[in-house]
Image (cartoon, coloured by chain):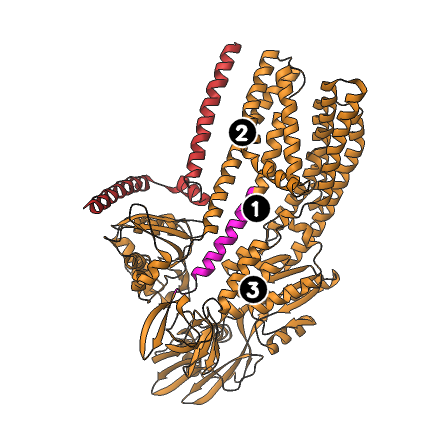
Chain colours: A red, B orange
Amino acid sequence: MTDILWLELVVGLIISFSLLGLLLWAVKGGQFDDGKKQMNGLLFDSTEDLNDAINKEKKIKELKANKEKNNLD
Amino acid sequence: MSNIECTHCNLSFPSEVMINEEPNLHFCCKGCQGVYHLLKDDGLDSFYEKKGKEKLSQPLAVDEDASNFDLESFRQIYIKTTPEGFSSVDLVIEGIHCSACIWLNEKILNDEDGILEANINFSNHKAKIVWDDDIIKLSSIIQRIRAIGYNAYPYKTGVKNSANVNKKRDYFSKLSVAIFASMNIMMIDVAKYTGYLTSMSDDAKFMIHVAEFIFASPVLFYSGIIFFKGAYFGLKNKIINMDFLIAFGAVLTYIYSLYVLYSGNGHSYFDSVAMIITFVLVGKYLEVIGKKNANDTIDTIKSSIPYEATRIKDNEKEIIGVDAIQIGDIIEIKNGQKACVDGKLISEYASFDQSSISGESIDVVKQKGDTIYSSTINTSDVVVYEATSTYANSTFNSIIELLDNSLNTKPKIQDITNELSKNFSLIILLLSIATFTGWYIYNGDFENALVVSISVIVIACPCALALATPIASLIGISWMSQKGVLLKDAKLIEIFNEIDTIVLDKTGTITKAQLEVVNISNKDLTKEQLNILYTLTDSSTHLVSMAIKKYLSSNYDNLEFIKLEDIKQIAGVGIDAKYNNQLIYGGKSQDINSKYTSFEFKIDNRSIVKFDLQDSIKEDALQMVEFFNKQNIDVIICSGDNEEVVKDVANKLGIKNYKANMKPQDKYDFVNELKEQNKKVAMVGDGVNDTLALSKADISISMASGSDISINVSDVVILNNSLKSLINSFYISKRTYKFIKQNLAISLVYNAITIPIAMAGYVVPLFAALSMSLSSLLVVGNSFRIKKDIK
């Protein structure tokens, strides 16, 4: 019984501290600099916004690749 | 006449003035109509779903040429290059009201080819834009923002700005860890305390202690590091500060709990370690946010000054950076532009909106040789003036520098440590050390001595005393918010009780900032004359025209719009028009009575009627003056308006002390002078011109209808703009303060009884913890009595 509890404790700690680490990484990256915007994103973001985010990532990659190519030329 | 809402901005206007379109579209102006169709054509009409019923301001019509944003001089000051070779600029976006505005701006920019990042902060409306200069120019980006009815100004990000951002992130991380760990410990505590009652096995108890130890350790050594640093600097300066006591108390409790974990005897207090650090850290985090907001405010003010000016040299115009302007340079400013430096008017005549300096919303007419102040807006045609200051020495830049200085050096109330609490903590610490030493000498049992000394700390520290002020303040603050007063810091309640002088701005604070007709020279106007005047005043959005129109609507029936021709606005003077070949004029009167604003209506140069207008005093102003007189608080009016007007208002309210013609710097100096006389000053204002004085006062109070800047620098915001709420803020703080003192007395009496018992060794730490909770309940229960006597 106690062994199971110890196992649960260790697993619980690993999971919760991993999530905490993820949160700290996000804070460091500036994702929580604008609390109100985060909150609004949670409440109102739709599929359209998610698609926009993916397209934006693609666009940034393309622009960076082009810039790098131009710089090499 | 019924009002209908504009499809774009949701503002209501009479149906007659709306531009109607099928199917059922109504626009208040061409700007709204243009933006609506632009969004629809670009497939961005979901903006209206996101916006909902939120009202926007009408789209900003900016005629300025955006090509200045591509000039090398601009690039050198504001544009940075990223490591990948992209350009980056920081902007403040004007016209943002809601999350839908943010979404629209980001969406429209992110869809633009060549833009990598367009990120707008919801709280301060600052935007960071990263783009590829080979694909798109900054001028095109700015034009895109302007096309949808917003505007953007650049601002310089300094070292201070990034330091503030990093500090906020650091504190946020520390607070996240502390809250996360404390919440977990609280859950584990449920099992622990239940276990005490149900004979928990030693194995399970050990496991719980291990879990609490794992959670409490990062709180003490990561989140609590700031207290160790504070304690170190305190000791270096030979001061036992609050940080030292918190760090010392937490470390001592942690060490004892480690001993319990190791020995298996007794009760661990890892939960107390986490809680103490978390609670105090919340206050510290709020302080960091406050400082960051203050710096954001400064950036917003700075961005409102133009970064370039048109200089006329050898009959040629050239665009130069504001820093390059020299005394004696001839500067040209167009209609709607701001003067960037002070100077003397060379043009024969001009009118300026000086609200940023004087707070008065009516344009001031200037003649050749008159002084032009930086940051005032030209409301006439193109004017030319000679610079009498450089940008660095200009009036507005001096205001910004003083404000920056004030906001960063103003002794934060958070820093004023409660002397009682400080001394109390030190005494407890000394008593605990004395208890440990005494018991160790007495029976030589280290464990027993440690347990008893810890009991002394636990029974006394920190709940009842720590709660005495915050719980009463919390109840007082929530009561205030119900009465329309927003208090930004709980400890202001204490300062409210020390105030002996209150300085009031006039326009918008004591008066309604709305002109009303007080005298009319001729009431027997013909139907035709009334209709001409009604139509004429309807064609202008000037405060005087609007007041006359309102007067006519409420005093005469069946008014009708008629067709006037050649309507011309003469800035700062009035309106000209033609009707059936007659020359119509409505505007400034030749007889200048400085107490009133006058408006004269003429047909073919023959005076028909004259109106005297005056800003009306708020209904509850007299009651407010009586209240402050009863409280022995000196009331002083401090206004940018002329002597006659200020004197008139002061006389009506029975206020003996008033100051007229006060510019922002004068107001600031006046408040400073009062403080030098050891007065505790509350300043109440609403405009940008009051900002400096607000930043200097012991308590700064602003009306919610005031400028964003004055609200940001204020400690207290009157949400409903009512002077009754100002009275309530003083009344509630006095009552709350009374209860804070009662709570402190309760906790001190409690400690006076329990500490000697604990020192004598009659209390084990568990009962000490329970007893501590009981004292907290007493304090909380007493605090709930604050709201009993609501007036």
Q: Earlier in the sequence, mark 3 or mark 1?
A: 1
Q: In this rendering, which labeled residue sits more in front, label 2 or label 1?
A: 2
Residue B83 - label: none
Please give the residue where the numbered disc 2 appears in the rendered image: B218
Judging by the rendered image, the residue that carries numbered circle 1 is B287
Figure check: A18 above or below B715: above
User: To which chain does the residue with label 1 belong?
Assistant: B
Residue nearest the viewer, comparing B705 with B175: B175
Residue B41's x, y, as percent?
25, 54
Image location of residue B395, percent across then percent down: 50, 69
Crowd around label 3: few <14 · some 14–19 · many ≥20 (10 Å): many
Between B31 and B490, the residue placed more toward the observer is B490
Q: Is residue B186 depicted above or below B49 in this figure?
A: above
- The amino acid type of the residue labelled 3 equals Asp
Q: Chain of mark 3?
A: B
**The numbered mark 2 sits on a residue in which chain?**
B
Q: Disc 1 on helix, strand or loop?
A: helix
Q: Quadrant of residue B21?
A: bottom left
Query: Is there one chain holding both mark 2 and mark 3?
Result: yes
Q: Residue at x 52, y 85 (%)?
A: B522
Taking depth in this image into account, of B137 and B566 the one nearest to the observer is B137
Q: Give the amino acid type for the residue marked by disc 1 in the picture.
A: Glu
Q: Give the residues drawn in magenta, as a range.
A: B285-307
Q: Which residue is mark 3?
A: B690
